[in-house]
């Protein structure tokens, strides 16, 4: 009796503090985008491990008693995990395509019915570099686009680089499907399309594969598997320049992070993000002649499963003014149905909502906040309603 009273008191205190204790602990192992991995788990590992206490998922585990793990093996892997049903949730900074959606329906059978895609967090994509003569590089978006399109190939030709003798530029990019790549080239493409930047036929296409984005441009690059691998390679190889989530860059000692247009990537903006910025049941179906993505209505949404795919229109965050300009919207993916018993369904819903939880946001370790911004509360409320429809 005495122990029951003690436990009741502890539970009451935890509830009052915004915590809850699951009647049945649930294990959830996710994978995908490496861009949000630091905010989600505080880790950069391809081996599943318990998230650190001050991360978003670490706080979720503490408050629910569930055991969530997440590995950042790339957005392409995350989408494949949801398509093939190998993970109950996944991350991707590259939105679903019609091909992805159709593949999900072909592989899911009747149980999972349809995919779920909701914006979870906003990240800044940092430009990391290793040029011995430039410790505080500040370059324009126009210069950056020319570098990655292969128009500028030597550091001595980069304005403000401080390099006076020839030093060939070595591009470092992601080797597989990557939402960080999608977001990076989304910005470069927007810059190329400015009236002041005639590009002729040398178009960087918006795509999650860097090799596709620069296909036909004669660009060579060194491919790396995830954001941390890009940062580490650049740090250790002179003449290199690459892109990675800002959090990975800031946590890695000794790597140089460039300013773009005078702005650093520590605190990305979310001013572009409101409910009108989100399209329902639209997916990427290809590219226009100018390299931008085409958004089209999903052609085969199962009956009763409309409204579960939310996409922030990429053009709206491709080139924000008066702020750091290279942004990514990271999504969490799941299944509308087939999530298991009531405890598992509740666990999945709670996890997908975790980035919107004000207590978790407040409790996120300051070092893990660098390079990230939360979804505005009015948008989060609407997205939470969508998540509540999961079964």
Image (cartoon, rainbow, N blue to C red):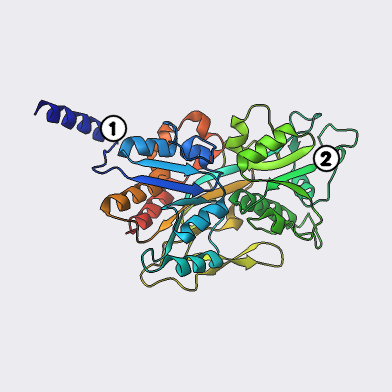
User: What crowding class fits label 2: few (fewer than 14 Cα within 10 Å), some (14-19), or many (20 or more)?
Assistant: many
Question: Residue at position x 36%, y 38% from top?
Answer: 61
Question: 275 or 51: which is nearer to us?
Answer: 51
Q: Which residue is mark 1?
A: 17
Alpha carbons under labels 2 and 1: distance apart: 53 Å
Q: SS class of the residue under badge 2?
A: loop
Asked if 322 appears above or below 339 in the picture, the reply is above
Question: Residue at position x 51%, y 53% from top?
Answer: 78
Position of residue 3 in the picture relative to residue 48 (left or right): left
Marks 2 and 1 in Cβ contact (< 8 Å): no
Callout count: 2
Q: SS class of the residue under badge 1?
A: loop
Q: Position of residue 124 (x, y in %)?
A: 59, 42
> Could you say which quadrant of the image residue 323 lies in?
top right
Question: Residue at position x 64%, y 27% from top?
Answer: 253
Question: Residue at position x 57%, y 37% from top?
Answer: 371
On-image quarter of the C terminus:
bottom left
Residue sitting farthest toward the right: 165
Q: Which residue is mark 2?
A: 158
Task: Let me know if residue 277 appears in the view.
Answer: no
N-terminal label among 2 and 1: 1
Q: Position of residue 315 (x, y in %)?
A: 61, 57
Asked if 233 appears above or below 386 in the picture, the reply is above
Q: Position of residue 94 (x, y in %)?
A: 57, 55
Task: Let me know if residue 79 appears in the view.
Answer: yes
User: What crowding class fits label 1: few (fewer than 14 Cα within 10 Å), some (14-19), or many (20 or more)?
Assistant: few
């Amino acid at each position: 009796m005495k122990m029951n009273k003690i436990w009741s008191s502890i539970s009451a205190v935890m509830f009052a503090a915004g915590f809850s204790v699951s009647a049945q602990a649930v294990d959830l192992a996710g994978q995908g985008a490496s861009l949000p991995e630091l905010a989600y788990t505080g880790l950069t590992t391809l081996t599943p491990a318990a998230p650190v206490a001050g991360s978003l998922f670490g706080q979720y585990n503490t408050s629910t008693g569930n055991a969530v793990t997440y590995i950042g093996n790339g957005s392409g892997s995350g989408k494949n995990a949801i398509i093939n049903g190998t993970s109950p949730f996944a991350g991707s900074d590259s939105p679903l395509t019609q091909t992805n959606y159709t593949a999900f329906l072909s592989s899911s059978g009747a149980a999972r019915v349809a995919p779920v895609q909701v914006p979870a967090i906003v990240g800044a994509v940092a430009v990391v570099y290793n040029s011995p003569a430039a410790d505080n590089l500040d370059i324009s978006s126009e210069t950056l686009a020319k570098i990655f399109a292969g128009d500028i190939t030597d550091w001595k030709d980069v304005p403000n680089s401080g390099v006076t003798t020839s030093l060939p530029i070595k591009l470092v990019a992601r080797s597989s499907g990557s939402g960080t790549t999608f977001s990076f080239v989304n910005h470069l493409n927007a810059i190329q399309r400015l009236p002041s930047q005639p590009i002729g036929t040398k178009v960087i296409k918006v795509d999650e594969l860097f090799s596709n984005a620069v296909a036909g441009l004669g660009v060579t690059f060194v491919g790396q598997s995830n954001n941390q691998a890009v940062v580490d390679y650049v740090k250790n190889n002179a003449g290199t320049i690459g892109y990675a989530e800002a959090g990975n860059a800031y946590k890695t000692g000794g790597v140089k992070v460039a300013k773009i247009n005078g702005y650093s990537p520590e605190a990305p903006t979310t001013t572009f993000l409101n409910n009108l910025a989100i399209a329902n049941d639209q997916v990427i179906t290809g590219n226009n002649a100018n390299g931008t993505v085409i958004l089209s209505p999903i052609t085969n949404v199962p009956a009763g499963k409309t409204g579960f795919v939310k996409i922030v229109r990429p053009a709206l965050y491709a080139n924000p003014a008066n702020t750091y300009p290279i942004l990514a919207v990271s999504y969490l993916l799941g299944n509308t149905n087939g999530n298991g018993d009531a405890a598992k369904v509740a666990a999945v819903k709670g996890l997908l909502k975790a980035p919107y939880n004000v207590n978790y946001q407040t409790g996120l370790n300051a070092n893990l906040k660098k390079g990230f911004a939360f979804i505005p509360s009015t948008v989060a409320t609407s997205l939470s309603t969508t998540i509540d429809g999961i079964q």
